[in-house]
Image (tube, rainbow, N blue to C red):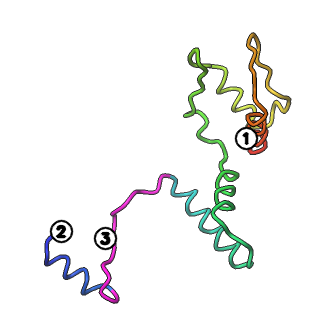
Amino acid sequence: MNLRSLEQSKSSSRDGKSKRKLGCGRKVSYENLDNDLAKWVRQRRKEKKKVSRRIIKLQAESSFNGSEDDLIHCFKEAGPVPEGRKLLEDARAGINDEPLQIEDEEFEVEEDTMIVIKLSNSMI
């Protein structure tokens, strides 16, 4: 950026502060989700309800519809799990509400991990 363009930027902006250039910065990954969340936040604020970062994050997670599940790769330590994607689709659709049964393997799970698993399953 040369000196002339810097001076033009400062003179055209309010209070001498430089403006951000259009097109600069990171692009939004999910524009529709971003727009939907912005509408939701404006609606909540209009209704005088609390809006925090945590609430916005939870709303974003709950508004995810699973349309991109085919892009998710399911793996275990031994390698890819081809039936993992089907299990994920069924869980999202609510087809199989019973707990997943894993055959031929035993796992030792700590109590903290079980809490995380329960929280993860409640978000599906």
Q: Which of marks 2 and 3 is in front?
A: 2
Q: Which of marks 3 and 1 is in front?
A: 1
Q: What residue type is labelled 3?
A: Lys
Per the image, label 3 sits on a secondary structure element best described as: loop
The span from disc 3 to disc 1 (Cα, nearest Å) is 40 Å
Per the image, label 2 sits on a secondary structure element best described as: loop
Where does the image place residue 76, in percent across and percent down from the top left? 61, 21
Q: Mark 2 points at which residue?
A: 1
Q: Is 13 above or below relative to 123?
A: below
User: Closer to the N terminus: mark 3 or mark 1?
Assistant: 3
The stretch in magenta equals: 14-29
Residue at horizontal 18 percent and vertical 68 percent from the top:
1
Q: Which amino acid does label 1 sit on?
A: Ser
Q: Mark 1 points at which residue?
A: 120
Q: Nearer the viewer, residue 82 or 49?
A: 49
* In the image, farthest residue toward the right: 98
